[in-house]
Image (cartoon, grey):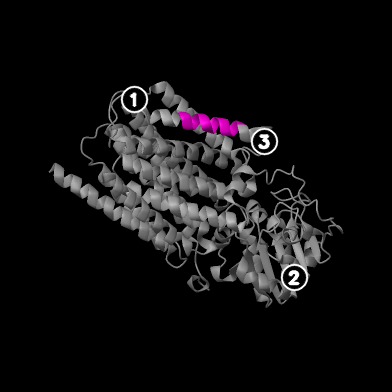
Amino acid sequence: MGINIELLIQVVYFGAAILFILGLKAMSSPVTARRGIVWAGIGMFAATAISFTYPGMHNYVLMTSAIFVGGVLAWWTGKRVAMTDMPQMIALYNGMGGGSAAAIAAVELIRLSAGGELTHSGPVSQVLAVLGALIGTIAFSGSLIAFAKLQGWMRKVYRFKGQQLFNMVVFAALLYFGWLLTGDSFGQNELLAFFGLALLVGVLMTIPIGGADMPVVISLYNALTGLAVGFEGFVLQNPAMMIAGIVVGSAGTLLTQLMATAMNRSLGNVLFSSFGTGDDGGGGGVEVSGSMKAIEAADAAITMAYAETVIIVPGYGMAVAQAQHKVWELTKVLQDKGVRVSFAIHPVAGRMPGHMNVLLAEAGVPYDLIYDLEDINSQFPNADVALVIGANDVVNPAARKDTSSPIYGMPILDADAASNVFVIKRGQGTGFSGIENLLFFEDNTRMCYGDAQDVAQKLIAGVKTL
Amino acid sequence: MEGFVALYIFMLAAFTGYEIISKVPTILHTPLMSGSNFVHGIVLVGAMVALGHAESDLEKIIGFIAVLLGAGNAVGGYVVTERMLEMFKSTKDKDK
């Protein structure tokens, strides 16, 4: 009987690994994406259920209650959270995964320090346990900071003199204790120091990073959690964890790379430069000429109603104002007037690549009206109106013109090429990068100040009266 | 030898992950990140095994935390991804 159960567990894990890969594969196309998550979900459910039959286990009451509490809390928060807050929820759940992997390693290492053995003993296993603990703990505390920042609980970007050096010293100390842990004589003090330092490194790595870079960082921590899970999978000799973890680790690394490239920044740049703090004198190279010219929503509405083509450029301001439904309503009334409306999405608009797509999809905008940067940029010169809703850095021509600008070289949406540019914006401040936006000073640009939702409502009313 | 088998698993899994992502349109980056976030929720299974074999009180406490966090990762990741993907529809899927 015992043998059969073990075989059954392995078969289910094997099936789960296949379902994870097929599920992720399906999620990479909009047509099949919805069935992808269901497949992966079935794999996860089966693997979890069969794990209750794992031989030689006890503590079932603790186990069930932990699953119940953790699951219900996550289910409840996940269902409740607004679409605009998705990025920080991903950061939060990701941090939990990293923490879980680190805690598994902690249990293993505590047993080892008390004279016991790892589940899978041997030097390779011990090194991987420590590595997984290190990576998982950093992903845990780093993700929580990212969550706090995106949630608005921590607005400040923390920098101080000698920060890099300080971080390096802390990291070196962490590596030292990690190395001690791969030996055969360490106690609880060393363990405590190791995990404490790893938590600190995650915090230190994340606090100096500004809001604009958060998507890249969350994606990086996602990849790191995957790696940690994969390594702990080896320690526990659990192939499902090994495969799922490493697949996510490599997929996440590539995704991180793609995001960084879309912003024309290297990963090292994101983690170590002082981008987005405002103290690097952004935009200083080119004189800001002209002034911002305001326009009433009613006047903008008239121009749009008589336009042939309108391209809408949404940004984080739309997400903050929850304006996506109003924007779709505006699109429909414009379409009724015979205006061709399309949406231009910059790869890093919002807080994550695809963030805007998700919001527009929520409002009901069909995805065939939505275009990527490469597909839409040639259309701007033919567009009568470019309507920029709460986007800033992704339409800043400084990226093309100003070699001294921190965002120089980043591909942008050429909204300035449209005949008329209307910018819906809450105030005159700069974007997340803290850089002055040259677009706002262009002759063909008019600023429409106000909350994106209110302005969209006024635009709808304006178009309808015609 | 056993270590090398693991190395092969790691290598093949890494290539698989790379292949999956390399052809994905931008529109699906966030859902896919969320989906991969869900997939590493498999850590729950390891956490259950770790807690199941915990002996001392300290091990039990940390094991309990591991399971709690792992369950949060798996369930939260699923709910969020599912909600996001539910909204992806093309023009022809919509009722007129």
Is A401 left, or right, of A147 in this rendering?
Answer: right
- Say the numbered circle drawn on residue A418: 2
For discs 3 and 2, the disc positioned in front in the rendered view: 3
Q: What element carries label 3?
A: loop
What's the residue type where badge 3 is placed? Arg
Please state the chain letter of the residue tagged with numbered disc 1 in the rendered image: A
What's the distance in space between the residues labelled 3 and 2, CA to CA? 39 Å
Side (left or right) of B90 relative to A304: left
Instruction: For the residues labelled 1 and 3, say whether their Cβ atoms are less than 8 Å apart.
Output: no
**Rendered image quadrant of residue A31:** bottom left
Q: What element carries label 2?
A: loop
Is residue A457 visible from the viewing direction of this image? no
The residue under label 1 is which amino acid type? Ser
Answer with the quarter of the image where residue A160 lies: top right
Q: Nearer the viewer, residue A397 or A163?
A: A163
Q: Residue at x 39, y 22 (%)?
A: A188
Q: Please report the bounds of the magenta region as a residue range.
A: A166-176
**Disc marking residue A159:** 3
Chain letter, disc 3 residue: A
Q: In which quarter of the image is the C terminus of chain A?
A: bottom right
Q: Residue furthest right?
A: A290
Q: Which residue is drawn at 52% across and 49% down?
A: A219
Q: Which residue lies furthest to the left in this view?
A: A1
Residue marked by disc 1:
A113
Q: Nearer the viewer, mark 1 or mark 2?
A: 1
* Residue A102 percent location from the top left of the image: 41, 36
Residue drawn at the location 65% of the way across and 54% of the way down: A316
Disc 3 or 2, which lies upstream in sequence? Answer: 3
Q: In this view, does A119 lie to the left or right of A295?
A: left
